[in-house]
Image (cartoon, rainbow, N blue to C red):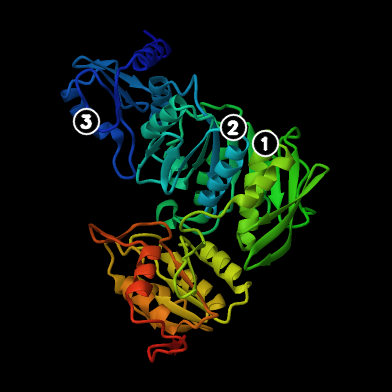
Amino acid sequence: MSFNEAWHALKTEVRNGRMVRTHSGQVQPGDVFVALAGTRVSGSTYIAEAIARNAGYVVTGPGQGGDSSDGALLLEHPDPREALGELAAAHFGTDASCPLLVGVTGTNGKTTIIHLLEHLLRSAGMRVGLIGTIGATWPGGSFTSGMTTPDCWTLHQILARMRDDGVTHACMEVSSHALQQKRTAGLRFEVAALTNITQDHLDYHQDMESYYQAKARLFAPNATQPEGPKHRVINADDPYGQRLLNQWGGVAYTLHDGGRLPKRGQDSSAAIRILHGEMKSCDRSGLELRMDFEGQSWVLDSSLVGRHNASNLLAAQGVGLCLGLESSRMTALEDFSGVPGRLERVTNPLGLNIFVDYAHTPDALENVLNALRELRFERLIVVFGCGGNRDRAKRPLMGQAVCRFADIAVLTSDNPRHEDPETILNDVQAGLGGGAAVIREVDRKRAIERALEVMRPDDVLLVAGKGHEATQQIGEEYFPFHDPTVIRRILGEGPGHASGRVLQAVRPCA
């Protein structure tokens, strides 16, 4: 039997219910075991265990298998991760029937954009599912995976559940890790969108070029989609976005005049269509944005603030246009009030200006701080830190971003994980070199208390880094910690607001 015949037969069996495993310890008699390579260990290392557990089939990479072994049929596939996607699509039927897929990748803005899209598409009568940082949700169901983009098998399972519940469109965040590991294998994207690419995850990708190449996978042809996604929506204000546009074309959204944009991509048929946005105003009540696209013009008033949110609104509208929505539909976004943990206002009985944001990269933090600075509060106070066991190189850059915009920087723990919190703070403090005054407090709750103690009525406080997260990881343990809840408890249980009080701990940056 040839490989193609054997592979077709296996997919038929999987479609009819034969189970697929990627963990050798979970293999049951007759199961298919797909040997995936990890970051340190080859997937073939676990083939013997899968066979010992009476696997019916073993799928492995070239040169790592044979015709058969102890009753298990070994198939050498050119790419086991692509193989897993094909098998998952067959098992769940997502190759035959699946919600229309929109994938959004980029360093910042992914969560806000998929929520904007959900709001926009639902207003047009579509049933929409979301998959992202805060989990998977859809009308009639939900799923918690613990990852921005679930593993390949789980992702197909979620999409099948959405389909069975009548979901027509699924909008998902696609992380660089997921693209590098081909977790989206076996899926066809109607639209792929890029927000931006700035420094993050270099502990995994090592350098910015590798990080970019991982993101670029979403826009390129692949085994499931040889022509690539049907539509590409790309931020032309980002230099990496420019590279993608030069290669593939698509809808280029921009807050600039668009004069430097190429007219076509590398393929002469890959035309670039320009969605231009102009910020007419931006204040504490929100922003006014004017759009121009292929002879059409319209205006949008949004309660979101900041240039980064103007860009997010453009991205969502670009996707909407690719999905066939008329420009007149875009005003539905005026009712969108925001995403939990993304520049979320924390209402409180004292009427203080307090916001929580998930910003945990230098660029994201700078965008949010700049947005708040433009609203002309008396002083800008920032509580922030950096996560442990992650890209150390970005830590001083986070400090630099804060010192460029903040009047008072309160340096504290984020999720220390398995690192010494004081060591993390030392790395961040290396970038706190001018402008702001600094309070250093490793305990996050106490840091928030100290920030509130120095607030004046017309100040603004940003608590950054954790956003919607409900826990704080210290070592192996996860402790309940939700920034908005902690803030409200402090203000509700405390003795009162220390307006105008300046702590002796405040000192200028070294």
Asked whether disc 1 touches disc 3, contact meaning CB atoms under 8 Å apart, the reply is: no
Judging depth in this view, the residue of 36 and 378 nearest the camera is 378
Q: Which mark is residue 26?
A: 3
Q: Kindly identify the residue that appears in the image at 37 percent across and 34 percent down.
A: 154
Residue marked by disc 2: 190
Vertical comparison of 134 with 89: above or below: below
Instruction: Specify the amino acid type for callout 1.
Output: Cys
Q: Which mark is residue 322?
A: 1
Q: Quadrant of residue 322?
A: top right
The secondary element bearing badge 2 is classed as: loop
- Answer with left or right where residue 489 lies relative to residue 128: left
Asked whether disc 2 touches disc 1, contact meaning CB atoms under 8 Å apart, the reply is: yes
Measured from the top left, where is residue 321 in percent x and y? Answer: 69, 38
Measured from the top left, where is residue 261 in percent x and y? Answer: 75, 50
Q: Quadrant of residue 495?
A: bottom left
- Answer with left or right where residue 394 lies relative to residue 216: left
Task: Indicate which disc, 2 or 1, sits on the residue closer to the N terminus.
Answer: 2
The secondary element bearing badge 3 is classed as: helix
The secondary element bearing badge 1 is classed as: helix
Other-residue count near label 3 (Cα within 10 Å), few / some / many at <14 / 14–19 / ≥20:
few
Task: Indicate which disc, 2 or 3, sits on the residue closer to the N terminus.
Answer: 3
